[in-house]
Image (tube, helix red, strand yellow):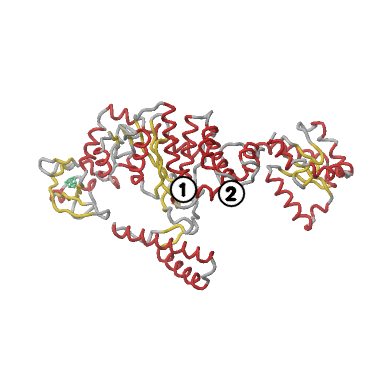
Amino acid sequence: MRGRFLLTQHFNRRSERAKRTALRTNATEAEQRLWQHPRSKQLGVKFRRQYSVDAYVVDFYAPRSKLAVEVGGDSHFRPSATVYDQERTRHLNRFGIEVVRFTNAESAENIEAVLAAIVEALKCWPTTSPWPPPLTRQIALRDLEQLSVANIVAWWMCGGRRIDHSTIGKFVQLHEDVLGQQFVTALAAWVVQRLKLRPGLSSIDGTVVESAASRWKLLQAEAAELAAAEASKAAGAEPDNPAVQQSAQAAQEVARVALQRCAKRAQQGKKTDTVVVACSDPDAVVQPRKDKVMRPAYKASTLMHEAGVIIGQYVVPSSETAAVTPLLEQHQAVFAQLPPTLLTDAGYHHEELLGELAEQGIDVLCPSGKAMGDDDWEKKGSKGLFAKNQFRYDDQRDAYVCPANELLSYADQGQDGRGHRYRRYRTAACAHCPVRAQCTTGKQGRSIKRYAGDEYKEAMVLVLLQPRAREVYGQRMPIAETVHAELRERFGLRRFHRRGLSAVRAEFGLYCIAFNLKKALRDTAVFLVFVVSGRQGGRGWAAAATYVVSMHIVSLSQTP
Ligand code: SF4
């Protein structure tokens, strides 16, 4: 009943009845002539005459197809009427209604062409914009705004309030802690309990998701400093202008991040002139997407259980390995223990990380190569040269044995750009080695650096030679990679909509909640999310925004 009441607030409302009747009674000749064809479902759908949407009355309207047909004098096509018609069309479009317009002359002289155009519009419109919009995959805030206007369930949930996109965005920001980590972990624990899952095979994987930052507004450190200085000057000249003050702060933040990244790269002995920062989202890092195109982006990681449930999720600017500790903490919070077996790809093949995981008692399987075929489990050397893993370390002699069976002995030690210490091994045999061209291009011959923790990498090679280990590792792809493929292809997570690391984390959390709901709770998702979110709602717009955000989660979870 409530929905019916709300419908009459916009469609064919009583206040417009007199206007509708007058227009029907005084229909023009062109309208009367055209009406002979769509009436009585002659075009396959029911049309109504003089139908009103808010204050606008359309000549003919097909409710099923949400198609409005207007027929009028040439005055409609004059500039003075254009603005009014545009506003009218925009208003109708807001309700998902498509408008086709014909002149009196067209209706009189070429009725076949007019009818053909209407039939064509009837064919395409229901598929291009269903009405009400489906409660599936509402991604952008403006989609949600439209949902709160258009969907009858949303009307009921929002108590008839209309929620604009900025209110929804502010609400998510305001409650990002609740909607973020705690909420995702609580939901994951609930799902685990409901599905009676036990800790088993788990996999960590990350993917690059483009940020909402503009790729046209990237600044190098020098330019960022200049922009910050100019913005500060402008802010000094207008101390009472909040907009100028805000842009000065934003410019300073961009300059600070640019300088920080330059300093870090310089410390690692890398070039600094390639560092660029996105002005509209300095937290994002310019990095290659999956298709190798460079964009300001974030790395979104998940810890998946073998049952296909996301146990942990985390977003970092660029380093996948930085997400491992928070992901393991979330596993601990959900299962009260760490994952017994963890499968990761070569991106996590770092001596330090392998050592930490081993010390925590986790059986980790992590090849250094792509592990796509029998011979692809170990990392290949760059430029086709022998890789480090082709050199065998002999701990008795503290030396490496090279592919030419020569002994590389300890030469010196040092520290790399990351601050990690190493011991370097060399041999004089390189000078007359027959396979030198396959081994090195250096004038001094080949050298091998040994880091603390390299023994974990060597142990991993031996473990992954076992057929059973390879068989278990074969389950990584379906466990880990399908989640990101599904989030990207079905949930539409190709780009974040919010800016800043904390907002992006909250946004990714919503996707993960939706993914888990879809996996485990398809039928009860709506109930659960409304119950949980209702606790956060409070009153008024906050409650309405809560419900819209909840619908966002549910709509994502209902993707096919
Ligand atoms: S170049 Fe030196 S390290 Fe390489 S295979 Fe020959 S002897 Fe061994």
Label 2: how many residues lie within 10 Å, few (<14), some (14-19) or many (20+)? some
- The residue wearing badge 1 is 504
The x, y position of residue 72, in whole percent, is: 83, 48
Residue sitting at 71 percent across and 35 percent down?
Answer: 4
> Who is closer to the viewer here, 342 or 371?
342
Viewer-proximal residue, 417 or 373?
417
From mark 1 to mark 2, how far is it between C-alphas?
17 Å
Q: Is residue 210 left or right of residue 458?
A: right
Question: Which is more toward the observer, 164 or 99?
Answer: 164
* Residue 465 against residue 140 in the figure, above or below: above
Q: Which residue, as the protein is rendered here, is positioned at the far bottom? A: 237
Residue 1 location (% of width, % of height): 70, 33
Residue at numbered disc 2: 165
- Which element is circle 1 on? helix
Say if residue 544 shows up in the picture: yes
Up/down of 546 relative to 1, above or below: below
Residue 560 appears in the figure: no
In the drawing, does residue 92 fall left or right of residue 158? right
| Residue at x-position 75% and y-position 42% | 68
